[in-house]
Image (cartoon, helix red, strand yellow):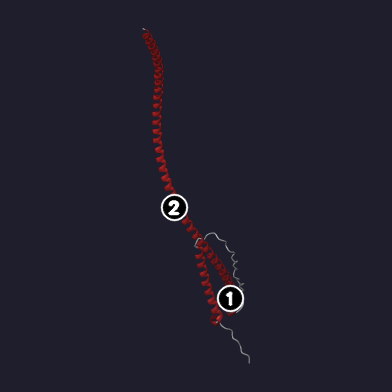
Amino acid sequence: MSRVLRPLSIAAAISLLVASPAFGQGMQLDKLLGDKLKSLGDQSGDAAKPKSPPAVTPKLPTPREPATPPVAPSTGSPAEDLARKLTNSQSESAGLRNLLGDKDNEIGALTRQLGDTSQLLDSVKTENGQLKSLLGAKDGEIGTLTGRLGDMSQLLDSVKAENGELKSLLGARDGEIGSLTGRLGDMSQLLDSVKAQNGELKSLLGARDGEIGALTGRLGEV
């Protein structure tokens, strides 16, 4: 004697569907997917905040769109409709898992890029510190040279003042030399005049000697 199967009511079919393990897994998957997408949005927002220096942008995988199963018109019982909807939801969940994998790959690529950018930033900061130290040393050297330049400028002013005084003394010496040269000329003329007078006196003295000789001769004759 065969057993006659009675059709389930809508309430009984829904109760069986909710109590099935597949339905519970679908609910957990939806919750996990929602949490993962929220975490993805938060990480993407955090990764966009710091301003990184120019870097090579990695080629990210092209995300796949979740497959949306076609919705067939309801032609069966409510239990069959719920089963069909569950199948569609599971297909959609598979597409979302694929999309989630693509997002994970994108997060991995961005994380690697962030690490490379962080290393580059550290290198740039180190170079910046070295340049600042070098700049400080150059500033110190410039300060030393500026001080020496100031000392040399003061020394130059002192030498210029001394040269001015020496030029004044040289001008005074030139005046004295001119005066002495004039006096020497006058004395030379006086010397020549005295020499001329001495010559004349010598001539007169010779004449006088002749006269004295003549007179002495005549006196002897007497």
Q: Quadrant of the N terminus?
A: bottom right
Q: Which residue is mark 1?
A: 90
Residue 119, horizontal then vertical, whole percent: 52, 64
Mark 1 residue crowding within 10 angstroms, few (<14) / some (14–19) / many (20+): some
Q: Which residue is mark 2?
A: 140
Residue 112, horizontal then vertical, whole percent: 55, 66
- At x 39% / y 19%, what residue is drawn? 194
Numbered disc 1: secondary structure:
helix
Q: Is residue 118 left or right of residue 211?
A: right
Distance from disc 2 to disc 1, alpha carbons, whole Å, reads 73 Å
- At x 52% / y 71%, what residue is drawn? 36
Residue 132, horizontal then vertical, whole percent: 47, 56
The picture quadrant where one finds residue 92 is bottom right
Residue 120, horizontal then vertical, whole percent: 53, 62
* Circle 1: residue type: Gln
Vertical placement of 53 versus 203: above or below? below
